[in-house]
Every structure is written in C-alpha cells, then in structure tokens.
Image (cartoon, rainbow, N blue to C red):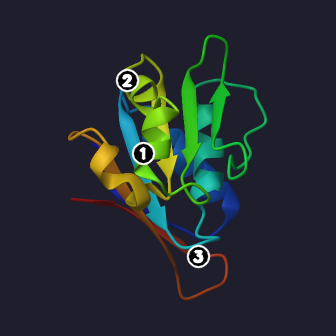
Amino acid sequence: MWNGVRSTSPAETRAAGMQFVTQLPPGKVAALHGELGSGKTTFVQGMAAGLGLTDQVTSPTFALIHEYGSPAGLYHIDCYREQSLVRWQSLGLQEYFDGDARTVVEWAELILPLLPEDTIHLQFTHGSRDSERRIEVRP
C-alpha cells in the first residue's frame, strides 16, 4: 500500500494523489486530516486525474459533497462547515461509503464515529518551507 510522500509543490501533491488513488480500491474511503492549506484539496485533484476524471475539482466546503464522473467515480466530502453527526446521517452519508465509487473525506476527524472501520487515514502537515507538505498514512 501507498506509504506517503514529501511534496515540495502543488504539482507534486497532485502527483501523489494520482499515485495514491491507483491503490485505493473502488468502494474504499480515504480520510484526510490536516490544517487549512495543507494540500488536501490539491491531493484530491490528483486523485480525480488519476481516475481519468475531467471534472474541475474544488473544495466542497459550502456544498458539503461533490460527485465527480458519470457515473460517479469519486465522492469528495468536506466536513469543515457541518460538524453534526446527526446532520451527516440525515444527509445519507452512509450511502456514499457503501457505493462503488472511491470516497475521500476532508476534515474527517469531525465525523470519526461515522467512518467505516477500514478507512485509510492520511495526515497532511506543513513542512519547513512554504511549499513543502508531508502526507503520511496514519494508523
């Protein structure tokens, strides 16, 4: 399985997402953890490109969920603005986890009890330089 990467540019972060998604089976969930601006959405852009999806990938902060592809090949969920577990359940979150598409969740720490047990957790951190990011698989 993918072990993580140190990125020195947005292009490298996108390339890491492209590489990671090739090892993420359909129906699997990836939880992205990290501070604002740590490269999570850039990584998801790479994931979409790695799946051959041509949709423009943007943060679903206000929409909460974006679906990419037709039929959907990637679900992109952002929990930053909506932190209520009850609200997420009422939105049918579980249906996204049970589908055939890959699902990626930003700010996943806010809905940990709702994530499947076999979720892959990735930690995004800022490096010592402005453009440096570290992306690591965490237990």
* Quarter containing the C terminus: bottom left
Q: Is 7 drawn above or below residue 51 in the view shown?
A: below
- Which is nearer the N-term, disc 2 or disc 3? 2
Q: CA distance from mark 1 to mark 3?
A: 36 Å
Q: Nearer the viewer, mark 1 or mark 3?
A: 1
Q: CA distance from mark 2 to mark 3?
A: 30 Å
Left or right, residue 110 beside residue 138: right
Q: In the rendering, at what x and y percent does residue 24 appear?
A: 38, 33
Amino acid type, label 1: Val
- Residue behind mark 2: 27
- Residue behind mark 3: 132
Q: Secondary structure at mark 1?
A: helix
Query: Are the residues flagged by discs 2 and 3 in contact, CB closer than 8 Å?
Result: no
Task: Say which residue appears at 52% left-offset and 81% top-offset.
Answer: 127
* Quarter containing the N terminus: top left
Task: Say which residue appears at 47% left-offset and 21% top-offset.
Answer: 101
Q: Nearer the viewer, mark 2 or mark 3?
A: 2
- Residue 21 visible in rendering: no
Residue 39 vs residue 107, the one in the foreground? 107
Q: In the rendering, at what x and y percent does residue 10 appear?
A: 68, 61
- Residue behind mark 1: 86
Amino acid type, label 2: Gly
Q: Residue furthest toward the top?
A: 71
Q: Secondary structure at mark 3?
A: loop
Task: Say which residue appears at 53% left-offset and 33% top-offset.
Answer: 91
